[in-house]
Image (tube, rainbow, N blue to C red):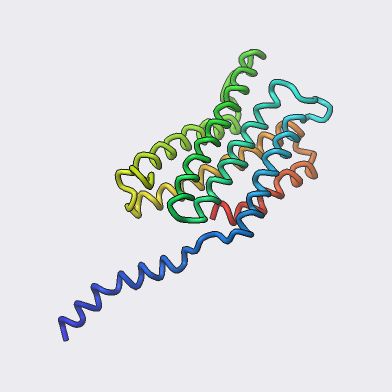
Amino acid sequence: GGRDHHKAKLRRPQHQHNATMAKMTPLPTNKYLLLLSIVIGHSLLGGYYAGTRPEGAGWRFFSWHPFLMMVGMVGLMGTATLTKKRMGYTNTKLHGMIAWAGLMSSYAGFYVIYQNKNTMGKDHYTTLHSKAGLAVLVGSTMLGMAGGVFLHPDFGIDKQNGLIRTGHKFASRGMLGLAWLATLSGLQTLIGEDDVKGLLFFAAPLVLAAPFTLL
């Protein structure tokens, strides 16, 4: 009796493992494509919209800041997260490449605002928006490097480590959530707090995509 009980105890984790695997199903193609169209469409249209605020300001050097940040953190990073949810070897590699492309776009957006502030003789990192943006860039870079070193499907040194995988997943989604909030705070500065309609119009696609992308 004792031996059978011991065997049952040994077997139980396998059942739990199977239950966990059953819960993790790849994101269906139709849902994937719909969500991609939301994050990519919003990054381009929302980025252009933010870049041309306040109304009548038109496109100028500064405009590249919100546009590149939106393309990087909403369009490309959103796509990278959704692609990882498709699961499997190829999608995992694509996820890493798209996420790094998103980081490069975001760094270009960072360069624009840094130069713009220098030109205008303004101080750096004086607002919550700028501090959050910097935290996202630094945090995302560290997470990207850790992902490459530990979790890359070809040469990751600990790619089967469940703890590292879970930590990478949730920390990255937390970073993305913070980045998306930073886009809203940046727009609020450009259009003013009174333009509730403009803010809601801008926030709607993010609110729609967030449960499927960030959770």
- Above-or-below relation of 65 to 204: above
Residue 95 locus on image (x, y percent): 49, 45
Q: For this view, does 65 lie left or right of residue 192? A: left
Q: Residue furthest front?
A: 90
Q: Nearer the viewer, residue 187 or 94?
A: 94
Tell me which residue sits at (36%, 45%) in the image: 154
Q: For this view, does 25 lie left or right of residue 151? A: right
Q: Nearer the viewer, residue 90 or 184?
A: 90
Q: Nearer the viewer, residue 184 or 142?
A: 142
- Above-or-below relation of 29 to 151: below
Residue 9 locus on image (x, y percent): 24, 75
Tell me which residue sits at (59%, 36%) in the image: 72
Residue 142 locus on image (x, y percent): 42, 36
Q: Quadrant of the N terminus?
A: bottom left
Q: For this view, does 156 lie left or right of residue 140? A: left
Q: Quadrant of the C terminus?
A: bottom right
| Quadrant in the rendering for residue 5 | bottom left
Q: Residue furthest right?
A: 56
Tell me which residue sits at (75%, 35%) in the image: 49
Residue 34 locus on image (x, y percent): 66, 55
Tell me which residue sits at (51%, 46%) in the image: 174
Q: For this view, does 211 lie left or right of residue 100? A: right
| Quadrant in the rendering for residue 194 | top right
**Number of numbered discs visible in the structure rendering:** 0
